[in-house]
Amino acid sequence: MPALLEVSAVTKRYGATRALDDVTFELQSGRVLAVLGANGAGKTTLIRCVTGTTHFEGTLSIDGVDVRAHGRDARRLLGYLPQHAAFHADLTVRETAEFYADLRRASHVEALERVAAVGLADHLDKRVNALSGGMRQRLALAVALLTDPPLLVLDEPAAGLDIAARIELRHLVREQRARGKTILMSTHWLEDVPYVADDVLVLEGGRCEFLGTARAFAALSARTSNLYLRVKGERTKAVRAARTVVMDGAVSSQGDWLVVACGPVEKGPVIEALVSAQVPILDLRVEEVAGGVGRPVEGGGVR
Amino acid sequence: MTPVIAIMRKELADAGRGRWLPVFAGAFAVVALVLCLVQATSGDLGSQGFNRTTAGLINLCLLLVPLLALVLGAGTIAGERDRGTLATLLAQPISAAELVLGKFAGLNLAVWSAIALGFGGAGIVMALLTPLTDARHYLVFVALAGVLATATLSAGMLVSVLSDGRMKALAIAIVLWFAMVLFYDLAAIGLALAFSPSGRGLLVTVLGNPVETVRILAVFSLEPDLEVLGPVGAYLVEELGLRTAIALLAGALVTWISAPLLLAMWLLGRQDA
């Protein structure tokens, strides 16, 4: 599959601060990439770079069209769903859809079809400021889908939505993926990732901290506990036993303690493995950690 | 439909929806008719009635029209920025220059409509009361009011692009209006008294402010008589001749319209949305 979105050494500075620092990745056509990170990690900045609404260093192209050199042409290839769908409040749903259809050189018929497709056909004459947050997001999605662009860029689409609207959003994303769309979406909801994403990019302080498949990310982020075990001698035997349950890199030593990074369902089997190997356990402690992501992981299905 | 036309149409529709267009059109009409009525009741409204009303309206127009256009121009891009819609707009397949141009065109059409409806409507009423011998002067005045609106709208849009919020943009626009319409005259008089500048120096002060340029052009259209024109007008006519002087002033207005607009288009393209 060819890469639809190519991001190479993209850096965005605000004075001395680097909001994005040398971010590089490729997004293959037809895949969904979730961009994760805490507030201020650089997710929205990355999306602004992709939409060409902010200046940056490095190169970024959509289907071979350079965003910096040919921003308008590149934007024809993407539909953008902003974090807070901001429309002109005094326009109706119909007027909004038709206005953006004119900007994107789509027909008014298509605009109204898109609005109907997201379930707003009964609200055409309602003013945008009278819509709920979820309805406004749906209108924004209708606008983003005008002219059927190959790339959808969703900036925190779940922000401010209730559970029902979030589930609905997951369905919409999966539906678009099934239709062959390539999707770049930022989110800080880890729970959404397994439902919608093929690949994951984690940003921290503007830097790429993880880039890989959603499966690799799930395996890494599920390791949420450090199991501390004080064993009586038999250190080599204990390490070997623990490694029958977790990956090699998950086992380390701290003084008398053996430290095993475990997922929620791995703690019991690790202890069981040590007991089976006849390693005497003198003491044990469990430390909950924020998540395994934060360590750079090379490879994966995105690059 | 091109994006520029789509944005222009939206601005025009917004002007109608926002009610400022009919309000200003009504205000212009009322001002013109009241002035005409005052002259009629004072017995002044003879064969020169239309002309006298026009002369009276020029000064009011030089006050009101720049205020309207500067405020409208200043609010447009900064307002989009405040509402968060600027990023949404610029994420569409349009350029910053197209956005500025579309808004400029739409606001121009709206302001010209307000001027045409207000002063034009009043002109029709006045034509029913007075002989039509001076109608040409009145039409030139209406056109000059429109050109002044275009020039000050362009300046307002530059202010809008340079401001990070609508309130800041409006405040700068009001200060700019004060400087252009009230302070500039006083400063020019002060400088003239202090330095006794040459005719060329006075000319520079006129070309440096579109309000002054329109004032001189309006006087040319009404009474190109050396006594009425004042020192700058007299200098222009004597040095350049009437036609060349008008061309020079018109050229200055074209520059006042295009330079801030082009600068606004370029600057918005270099800014982050």
Image: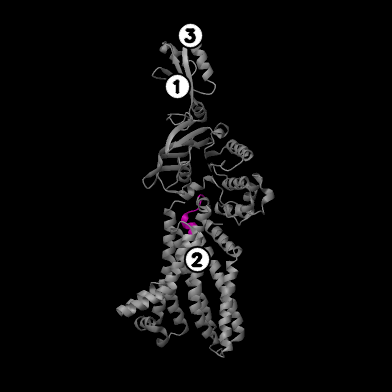
Work out whether A80 lies above or below B23: above
Do marks 2 and 1 both belong to one polypeptide chain?
Answer: no
Q: Is residue A269 left or right of residue A167?
A: left
Location of mark 3 (residue): A278
Element carrying mark 3: loop
Amino acid carrying mark 3 in the image: Gln
Residue occupied by mark 2: B71
Helix, strand or loop at mark 2: helix
What chain is tagged by disc 1?
A
- Looking at the rendered structure, the kind of residue marked 2 is Val
**Foreground disc of the pair 2, 3:** 3
Q: Which mark is residue A250?
A: 1
**Three-letter amino acid code of the residue under disc 1:** Ala
Give the extent of the magenta segment: B91-100
Q: Position of residue A68 (x, y in %)?
A: 42, 47
Q: Residue furthest top?
A: A278
* Residue at the limit of the structure toward the right, as seen here: A122
Marks 2, 3 in one chain = no
> Marks 3/1: CA distance?
21 Å
Q: Which of these two is toward me, A128 or B111?
A: A128
> Decide: marks 2, 3 in contact (CB < 8 A)?
no
Which SS class for mark 1? helix
Residue at 50% over, 68% down? B69
Question: Which chain's residue wears label 3?
Answer: A
